[in-house]
Amino acid sequence: MKLSLLTIAAVLLVSACAKPAATPEPYVSVSLADLATKSQLIVYGNGMGWATRYNDTGWSKNKNGPRLQRFISTNIDGEYVAVFRNFDETKEYGRATFTMPAALDAINGVTDLGYKFTITRNDEDTLIYTLSGLFTINLREGNSTTLYAGGGFATGSYTDDGALQLLSGSANYSGNFIGDSTYAGRVTGDVDLNVNFDISVDELDGKIYNLAGTTGSYIFNDLIISATIEPVSSFGGILNVEFVSGGVFSFGETGQIKGGFYGPGAEEFGATIRITDGNNHILSGAISGSLEP
């Protein structure tokens, strides 16, 4: 039977008000292909984007800004409705029905309110519970001016908190990074994630590495992940910069990461990241991956 994520959220809310069971039963997260029509896939990435006005003193880089807010599943495999909005200005950029592209491919379109957008998929063909990648949205009606905002997105069919609490010990994940840099264009790389599921610790660490841009000869530092598990099978924390001679980020600069676990037993993960040097360089994007065999 297909279950809506809205239904799941309602069940979790009722469960939170009741006395917890002595032995919680794990919730079996469904694959994306089995999502009920109109399931809501909320996107991680609040405040982790960039804009072509990044060096305009009137533009805040650290607020929500325009972003891809959620996907809504349809009754067609791989087809979703993307919802774009700006929470700072309570501005809607509209919706668009599209088919999720294959790994590292992109889809271009126009929302029902007339704003051009792109959605680019991360390198994640083997994932069945998780979606991640990049988006852009034009900030001008009618698209007469090229003025884009964008960032990473990560979402999916999440692991239930009860199921997550049944996991213990350590687990190792691996996957891929895709991002955009205001210096170096499109950036790709690898990611390793190490998770301790012991309820008294709930920590995860890892590294985003082998980062390479498509323009310029910039040397990217490895980014060290330090985060903790939060409610609703999510995690959040910081990125620390690993020193490298000539690195584009200075040692001591930090970024942010926010993501979640997906699948019945946290088989997959997805997250968005953002780091800036405080001036004109912003690197934002998404990571996703799965448990190592």
Image: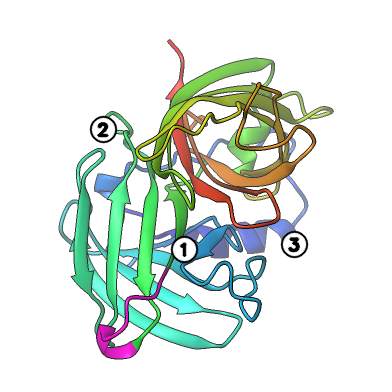
Q: N-terminal of the two: label 3 or label 1? A: 1
Q: Residue at x 38, y 82 (%)?
A: 93
Q: Which mark is residue 245?
A: none
Q: Indicate the position of residue 35 as horizontal and vertical percent values.
A: 31, 53
Q: Residue at x 31, y 34 (%)?
A: 123
Q: Indicate the position of residue 91 as horizontal and vertical percent values.
A: 49, 87
Is the C terminus in the top left, top right, bottom left or bottom right quadrant?
top left
Rendered view: 85 above or below 248 = below
> Mark 2 belongs to which amino acid?
Asp
> Mark 1 belongs to which amino acid?
Thr
Does the segment drawn in magenta span residue 146? yes
Tell me, yes or no, if residue 20 can be seen here: yes
Q: N-terminal of the two: label 2 or label 1? A: 1
- Residue that numbered label 1 is attached to: 7
Tell me, yes or no, if residue 1 can be seen here: no
Query: What span is colored magenta in the figure?
Result: 141-148
* Mark 2 neighbour class, 10 Å CA radius: few under 14, some 14 to 19, many 20 or more: few
- Residue that numbered label 3 is attached to: 17
Rendered view: 69 above or below 59 = above
Indicate the secondary structure of the residue bearing disc 2. Answer: loop
- Residue at the outermost top position: 293
* Mark 1 neighbour class, 10 Å CA radius: few under 14, some 14 to 19, many 20 or more: few
> Mark 3 belongs to which amino acid?
Cys
- Residue that numbered label 2 is attached to: 125
Q: Nearest the camera: 100 or 267?
A: 100
Q: Indicate the position of residue 125 as horizontal and vertical percent values.
A: 26, 32
Indicate the secondary structure of the residue bearing disc 3. Answer: helix
Indicate the secondary structure of the residue bearing disc 1. Answer: helix
